[in-house]
Amino acid sequence: MSTIKNQEVPILREIEPLLPDDIANIKDRIVSSIYQQAEDISARVVKTENSYQASLEARLDGILTSRWLGFPIMLLLLTVVLWITITGANYPSQLLASGLFWIEGHLLHLFSTLGAPAWLTGILIQGMYRSLAWVVSVMLPPMAIFFPLFTLLEDLGYLPRVAFNMDNLFRRAGAHGKQCLTMCMGFGCNAAGVTSCRIIDSPRERLIAILTNTFSICNGRFPTLIALATIFMGTLIARAYSSILATLVVVAIIMTGILTTLLVSYFLSRTLLRGVPSFFVLELPPFRKPQLGQILIRSLLDRTLFVLWRAIVIAAPAGALTWILANSFVADTSVFALIAGWLDPLGQLMGMDGIILIAFLLGLPANEIILPILIMGYLSVGTMLELDSINALRLLLLDNGWTWITALCVMLFSLLHFPCGTTLYTIFKETHSARWTIVAALLPLALGILVTSMVNQGAQLIMR
Amino acid sequence: MLCLSHMKDQKGEYMIETASLPIQGQEHTGNFVVALAGNPNVGKSTVFNRLTGLNQHTGNWPGKTVIKAEGTFSHRNQRYTLVDLPGTYSLHASSSDEQVARDFICFSRPDITAVVCDATCLERNLNLVLQILEITDQVVLCVNLLDEAERKKIHVDTAMLAHQLGIPVVGTAARSGRGLSKLKDVLHDMVIGKIATTPRQVVYDQELETSINEIEKRLTPYLPNWINSRWVTLRALEGDFNILEYIACNRPGNCPQQILPEEVALCLQ
């Protein structure tokens, strides 16, 4: 039972022996008596004629939030949205890639005609332009399809129903039910997700929500996942089913993220952040007719262009930096290769390699640029090949020893690693604590190293 | 009264002047304080805006990031100060919104608490009404969004509701202004004592009622007479001793230490 802290208040000492042991039970009984009587009164004063609209909504709610159908429907919707994204993004991606690399060829030609020095051409074209081209061609099409679809679900009023379905799970994990909403927010952007944790009042539960927000795959990581799933997992089986398999892999990664959120919340609420979850009321808003024009404008302008712009702003300097690292030599070996060499043992343990780990490290400012840096890294270390299509990307990765296990480990590591710089800064601002910010960075990283190593070793065993 | 105007908030800035907070126990100078409570999204702000018009100002609740809106209006030669409480589903004080609403109704003791509720989902709203009735008996219920309820073919029997709750009930559609003059009339009749309320008490299960009676008997001598001892007892049963500690510490000559966080310390004599 909860003890009385202030023994100096005599009246509290006097009533303490009279108080029952099971406070939680008392709370429940008090609340249920009130609810019971509210129900009684309401039954006497409210008369509802059957209205078609109301009964339809009630039935729909009953299905969407039902015990048995709620989760399958959620999974199904998620899968459909991702499948449309993956299938639909394929062709425009190819088109953009070939267009942008056609321009690259002409730019290179222009630079050599003008007699520009090799380092300038390297930094500007092979460094900056190439990473920009990759960011745009790999990321723009999936975003332009995924975000409007996601906003559509949001606009229909489906997200609060998701929260309703998930509430129980979060409570069992010792977290606040509202954490589901902040988690959904994190699927957009982890920094926004962390900020949205303000809706949770209890500091303990807010901290849990903040620390686990990075396990929601954010906008910056979706395109990487989708691209890798498409080019690797998709080729494991017959072409006709490839996009379905790719979709299922992405869904599985997202589900792994949600599961990790729950497990880590459970772990935190039993160790570092102990306490009882507080309850809250979640109002299911009426279903609304979505405003299609609004959705397109909002998702394209606010999300797609915003994310793309951020990626471009960060990809350009990061691309230049990568090129410089790859072209500065210390005794015959480039700095890039040197660092990659150091990181390689750890990378191999985790089913990846040194260059992939460098890409994640350089991707700290924004996860969007992990894939472009990776490509540049391979291109600068290995032979220069003309990279003008998604298929060429696959060949490049295969040339560098990638298997489906590598792709899987990269996908898992992109789920489980330190949050991006913006998110870390936001966590610091929200918690006012360097200590918790460090925890927020190291906790997912440690998990990532552990999980990828285990998956890698396990997969190697099976393949053998 | 505890003066809050020189307390600083987290950023070290001086807080909003709280002189306009009602001082309870004072003889009325013709200015009555009405607290506006209710669930979120029930049109509470519409009622507030409709009643006060342009005579309002906003600030923050002392020590909280919760917005506080206050306004005035006159009706039949009486002046009223209307305080818009944050929208809450309950008064369990599990969030700062709920705490602000609860502390205001309990400690600042408005002359009347007007609860706005949504006619289209009355049952959920009644939970809050019943909880408020445990703290104060000067309550008027405003069943808002009647227009929307009519569209959804939901009929609310306000006379029956008044009978069930033992408080006046006014049906409104604040967006069009319907029923608001009736609401003002009822407020007037309540402050001049023409309407007396007999609020319904929530009855708990046998075992709980026994505990309540036993503890309430012990507590009553310690409590100031303006506070509802049954309500304080219920909170103690739930393990929430803030109210008791607070009252104990504010009894004359009995103030061992500052126990409550400053923010809970709203105005008390």
Image (spheres, coloured by chain):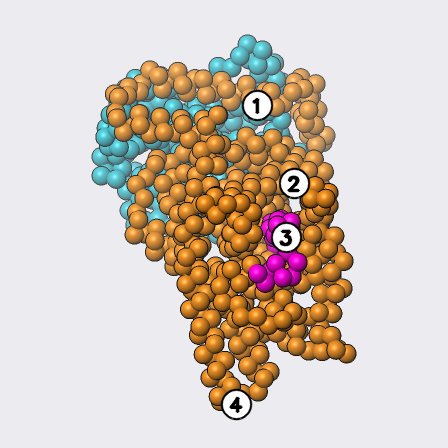
Helix, strand or loop for disc 4: loop
- Residue A347 spot, x, y in % from top left: 71, 56
Amino acid type shown at disc 3 = Thr
Pick whichever, A69 or A186, lies toward us: A69
Is residue A272 placed above or below A71 in the rendered structure? below
- Residue position for label 3: A403
| Among the two numbered marks 3 and 2 on one chain, the one whose residue lies closer to the N terminus | 2
- Residue position for label 2: A264
Q: CA distance from mark 4 to mark 1?
A: 80 Å
Q: Which label number is shown at residue A115?
A: 4
Asked if one can make out residue B121 in the rendered structure from this viewpoint, the answer is no
Q: Nearer the viewer, mark 3 or mark 2?
A: 3
- Residue A47 spot, x, y in % from top left: 28, 19
| Among the two numbered marks 4 and 1 on one chain, the one whose residue lies closer to the N terminus | 1
Q: Any idea which chain is the cyan one in this picture?
A: B
Provide the chain ID for the residue under circle 1. Answer: A
Q: According to the rendering, which colour does chain A have?
A: orange
| Among the two numbered marks 2 and 1 on one chain, the one whose residue lies closer to the N terminus | 1
Amino acid type shown at disc 2 = Val
Give the residues in magenta. A395-419
| Among the two numbered marks 3 and 1 on one chain, the one whose residue lies closer to the N terminus | 1
Provide the chain ID for the residue under circle 3. Answer: A
Is residue A453 placed above or below B180 in the rendered structure? below
Q: Which label number is shown at residue A27?
A: 1
Q: Are marks 3 and 2 on the same chain?
A: yes
Provide the chain ID for the residue under circle 4. Answer: A
Q: CA distance from mark 3 to mark 2?
A: 30 Å
Helix, strand or loop for disc 2: helix
Q: Are marks 4 and 1 in contact (CB under 8 Å)?
A: no
Q: Are marks 3 and 4 in contact (CB under 8 Å)?
A: no
Residue at x 59%, y 72% (from the top left corner): A384
- Residue A181 spot, x, y in % from top left: 50, 41
